[in-house]
Amino acid sequence: MAFTLYAQARTALARDSLAGLSVGDALGAQFFVPGRRPADLAAGRLPEPVWEWTDDTEMACSVFAELARTGRIDRDALAAAFADRCEPHRGYGPGAFTVLRLIRTGTPWPVAAATAFDGQGSLGNGAAMRVAPLGAYFADSVTEAAAQATASAELTHAHPDGIAGAVAVAVAAALAAQARLDGRRPPATDFVAAVAASLDHGPVRHGLDRAGTLIGRPVDEAAYELGNGAQVTARDTVPFTVWVAARFLDDYPAAVRACVEAGGDIDTTAAIVGGIVAAHTGTGTPGGVPDAWLAAREPLPDWTG
Ligand SMILES: [Mg+2]
């Protein structure tokens, strides 16, 4: 990139990513309702509105608002925002709910995050599910996207896998937004390789390396090989989502449909993929987040501006 990215442009990219994340989350969550079938979506039949968003969106809104306010992650402020805004009915996992309750009742976030899962820290996909708008915000620097993603992840995810998942998704969103600004679409293999290169060796990196060998394969095969989030871990969620985003980087509806068809933790895989892809496509554009889908999604909180 050969131009300066001003705060207003950063915020606009992050807002597009948040739109894609929240629509993916809200639409994905519809498929946990009995009677809903992926085949309906494939045939163009959308669930009845309103599509309520879940914890993925609630936390992503706090990440977005913090960046829009200060341009970086203030960890104490973001931890307090996560804890104060946590609405239990949004589908938080028990581990995340416990960490946020500890923070809300005065436990410092490093202590709260470290106590999760018998002192090992969370290796779940929760830090990855909320971070795509942050990556879009740092479209001019993969290094900064990774550093700020780490800062945002550590508030709830002390395990290296949980942090690596967030770094991978933020880097993917940064690359997606960067490619949009440059007016090009990177080959899927290059995209996955660039995301993998941002990580140290470990299970998430291993999964991304594997994802790079599956470009061109069917969605169900990729989900079988990489996981579909059914274990709600970073390692069984993030490699598949980066694969889907790379494969469908200029087609938001197809990207979200792929997540729905793959099953598993659908609201989270669709939130991650939606956040990455919308950083590239925008909303209301050909291949972007459809206006009708945005209109069907429950409105975002007023404090996101
Ligand atoms: Mg959720």
Image (tube, grey):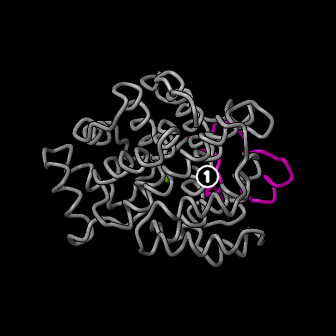
Asked if 257 appears above or below 26 in the picture, the reply is: below
Where residue 8 appears, as percent x and y from the top left, is 50, 21
Q: Nearer the viewer, residue 101 or 149?
A: 149
Quarter of the N terminus within the rendering? top right
Q: Is residue 5 left or right of residue 150?
A: right
Does residue 32 show up magenta in the picture? Answer: yes
Question: Label 1 is placed on what type of residue?
Answer: Val
Please give the name of the residue rendered at 57% of the width and 73% of the height, measured from the top-left corner.
209
Check the image and report above or below for 262 versus 80: below
At horizontal 57% and vertical 43% (from top left) the residue drawn is 21
Q: Pointer 1: what residue?
A: 273
Above or below, 201 relative to 152: below
Q: Residue at x 63, y 78 (%)?
A: 225
Residue 35 visible in this rendered orientation of the protein: no
Q: Is residue 232 left or right of residue 115?
A: right
Residue 221, percent across and down?
72, 76
Question: For the residue carrying disc 1, how many other residues have a C-alpha within 10 Å: few (<14), some (14-19), or many (20+)?
Answer: many
Looking at the image, which residue sits at the far front? Answer: 2
Quick check: can you spot residue 199? yes
Residue 144 figure quarter: top left
- Which one is nearer the viewer's eye here, 98 or 115? 115
Question: What span is in magenta?
Answer: 26-52
Q: In which quadrant of the rendered view does residue 53 lie?
A: top right
Figure check: 47 above or below 120: above
Q: Quadrant of residue 242?
A: bottom right
Relative to 20, is 305 on the left or the right? left
The number of numbered badges drawn on the structure is 1
User: Is residue 231 shown in magenta?
Assistant: no
Q: Nearer the viewer, residue 64 or 295?
A: 64
Percent x, y of residue 258: 72, 59
Residue for point 51% across, 45% down: 132
User: Residue extending furthest bottom?
Assistant: 225
